[in-house]
Amino acid sequence: QQQVKQSPQSLIVQKGGISIINCAYENTAFDYFPWYQQFPGKGPALLIAIRPDVSEKKEGRFTISFNKSAKQFSLHIMDSQPGDSATYFCAATLHISNDYKLSFGAGTTVTVRA
Amino acid sequence: DSGVTQTPKHLITATGQRVTLRCSPRSGDLSVYWYQQSLDQGLQFLIQYYNGEERAKGNILERFSAQQFPDLHSELNLSSLELGDSALYFCASDRQGSSNEQFFGPGTRLTVL
């Protein structure tokens, strides 16, 4: 059972366009929301992350928007480049005492056409 | 390069067999996580070890087991393999087992024929 629901499954965008990936969660105990980027043949790598007390975080061309009341968050990739072509996973972290669990969304494959 | 190493890179075996996947965490990381990535299930958390002890269990089958050794490397053992076990298996590590960033290895691609 997916604790974090991610959409779309895939998207194609022209170079210079905006890619938008959406995620939704149910468990309000989640306290950290990272996005991981995975290139073919590689393991996922942390791209950008946000805490639920912040509504937006921007790092370069990547922006996370967070809506706590709707339990939704999204990744925007501005001025998309061919090098951004990868699979993107949203995730949510649950901290309990010294333990934490990372739950991933199903992933979105982004293809940027030159 | 994340600093996490996994061997082998590829593994092809037959149903019913047993295999062992190996992971070496980043230098200084005490915690190791195992994930299974398949096309229809995404990234599924299997199990976590911290400094040699099992800390958390996810969707790990009883046919699968893991351990973390005193030198902190970890092995994932998969037995009585089925076709559906074909997947990418990732190992990740972090410093204390409670940080917010995990560092993933390059994965082991397992094909069960």
Image (cartoon, coloured by chain):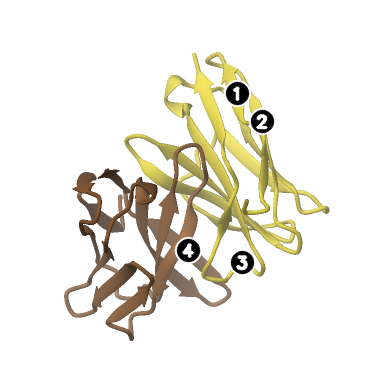
Q: Amino acid at mark 1?
A: Leu
Is residue B31 or residue B27 the one in the foreground?
B27
Chain B: colour as depicted = yellow
Task: Give yes or no for contact between labels 2 and 1 (Cβ–Cβ under 8 Å).
Answer: yes
Q: Is residue B62 above or below residue A64?
A: above
**Which residue is tagged 4?**
A101
* Distance between mark 2 and mark 4 Cα atoms: 26 Å
- For residue A19, what is the image quadrant? bottom left
Tags 2 and 4 both on a single chain: no
Judged left or right of residue A90, residue A6 is: left
Q: Residue B60's spot in the image, x, y percent? A: 50, 43
Identified by mark 2, the residue type is Pro
In this rendering, position of residue A29 left or right of residue B34: left
Amino acid at circle 4? Lys
Q: Which residue is mark 3?
A: B97
Q: Residues within 10 Å of mark 3 (few under 14, many from 20)?
A: many
Residue at mark 1? B11
Residue that extends furthest to the right in the rendered view of this protein: B70
Task: Please state which of residues B11 and B68 is positioned toward the viewer in this rendering.
Answer: B11
